[in-house]
Image (cartoon, rainbow, N blue to C red):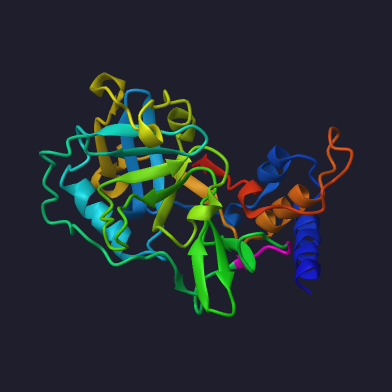
């Protein structure tokens, strides 16, 4: 039934769009404006590094306390002058305070936050994928983020796909404050799911983080200060004047265009593919973001 629903939605979308698109670019070019959503400035972070701007969309609908604490840190300028301290090959890039002996004050932000590893599935927006998954009973998308859920336990969670952002922590479940964050730069690290708080994803600039020089210390930490990449500043978009914000919009994961995109990924029919897989993993579905055209 789920598979039929996806196919029906895709067919309806194809009819609405006109000639069936052969490529993702054609699909997005034909998509109606209503299938896109403008990123909320209050939940969008701009991290400025020498290589350029990294844009992170936070997910307060999933983990409300952690994004709020990160926002408090950003407003206070906590991240300004810190650094990217770790780059582990095929895994993560991590940033935070490199000075463990004299750490920067968190100010009004909380030092510890109760774990937000999972969320009650009831009332949680979820667009289910029709295919089976290795790590979860069901996978799909929640308000633009890759997600999973377990009907038996009644819990849902965001998953560690490429470019997802999480809160670094120690062994204690409540030891993550958002003062240290990481982004996935390699294969989907799904073993981390439900063990750490996922707070968002890099929607622009992951290409700046992925090529970072790999650290030679344990777990990819940099051993020398000069190896670190300095962070000039991290600001919420809402804290900047309108003219300095980027009008980014994301394709709605509950839209007909997205349903068509998923089907195109499951059954590729372009000129290059000869044997469509007939299946897609949640982390292999693209989540398009573009600048809004006025």
Q: Quadrant of residue 198?
A: bottom left
Residue 215 in sight here: yes
Residue in front for this viewpoint, 16 or 122: 122
Q: Position of residue 211 (x, y in %)?
A: 47, 25
Question: Where is residue 110 shown, x and y percent of the image?
Answer: 18, 59
Residue depicted at 31% across the width and 53% down the height: 169
On screen, residue 142 above or below 31: below
State the predominant SS element of the stretch in magenta.
loop
User: Is residue 91 left or right of 241 when viewed as pictured?
Assistant: right
At a point 26% along the width and 63% down the height, the residue shown is: 113
- Does residue 167 appear left or right of residue 138 in this picture? left
Compared to 3, does 203 lie above or below? above
Please report the residue visible at 57 percent of the width from the left and 57 percent of the height from the top.
252
Viewed as shown, does residue 272 lie left or right of 28? right
Residue 247, visible in the rendered structure: no
Where residue 195 appears, as percent x and y from the top left, is: 43, 60
Q: Is residue 128 magenta?
A: yes
Residue 287 is situated, as x and y percent measured from the top left of the image, at: 58, 48
- At a point 58% along the width and 80% down the height, the residue shown is 152
Q: Where, by quadrant of the figure, is residue 69 drawn?
A: bottom left
The stretch in magenta equals 127-131
Count of marks, rendered view: 0
Quadrant of image for the N terminus:
bottom right
């Amino acid at each position: 039934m789920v598979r039929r629903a996806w196919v029906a939605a895709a067919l309806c979308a194809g009819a609405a769009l006109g000639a069936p698109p052969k490529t993702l670019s054609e699909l997005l070019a034909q998509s109606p404006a209503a299938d896109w959503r403008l990123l909320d400035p209050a939940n969008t972070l701009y991290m400025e590094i020498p290589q350029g701007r990294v844009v992170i969309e936070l997910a307060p609908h999933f983990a409300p306390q952690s994004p709020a604490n990160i926002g408090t840190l950003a407003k206070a300028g906590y991240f300004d002058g810190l650094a990217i301290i770790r780059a582990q090959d095929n895994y993560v890039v991590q940033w935070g305070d490199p000075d463990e002996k004299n750490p920067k004050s968190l100010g009004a932000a909380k030092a510890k936050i109760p774990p937000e590893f999972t969320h009650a599935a009831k009332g949680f927006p979820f667009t289910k994928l029709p295919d089976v998954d290795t790590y979860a009973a069901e996978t799909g998308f929640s308000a633009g983020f890759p997600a999973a859920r377990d009907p038996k336990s009644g819990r849902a969670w965001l998953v560690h796909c490429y470019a997802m952002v999480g809160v670094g922590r120690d062994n204690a479940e409540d030891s993550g404050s958002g003062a240290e964050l990481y982004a996935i730069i390699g294969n989907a690290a799904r073993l981390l799911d439900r063990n750490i708080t996922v707070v968002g994803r890099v929607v622009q600039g992951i290409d700046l983080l992925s090529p970072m020089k790999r650290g030679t210390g344990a777990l990819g930490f940099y051993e020398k200060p000069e190896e670190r990449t300095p962070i000039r500043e991290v600001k919420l978009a809402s804290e900047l004047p309108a003219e300095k914000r980027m009008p980014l919009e994301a394709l709605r994961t509950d839209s007909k265009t997205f349903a068509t995109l998923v089907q195109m990924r499951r059954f590729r029919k372009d000129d290059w593919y000869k044997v469509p897989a007939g299946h897609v993993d949640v982390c292999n579905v693209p989540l398009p973001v573009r600048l809004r055209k006025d």
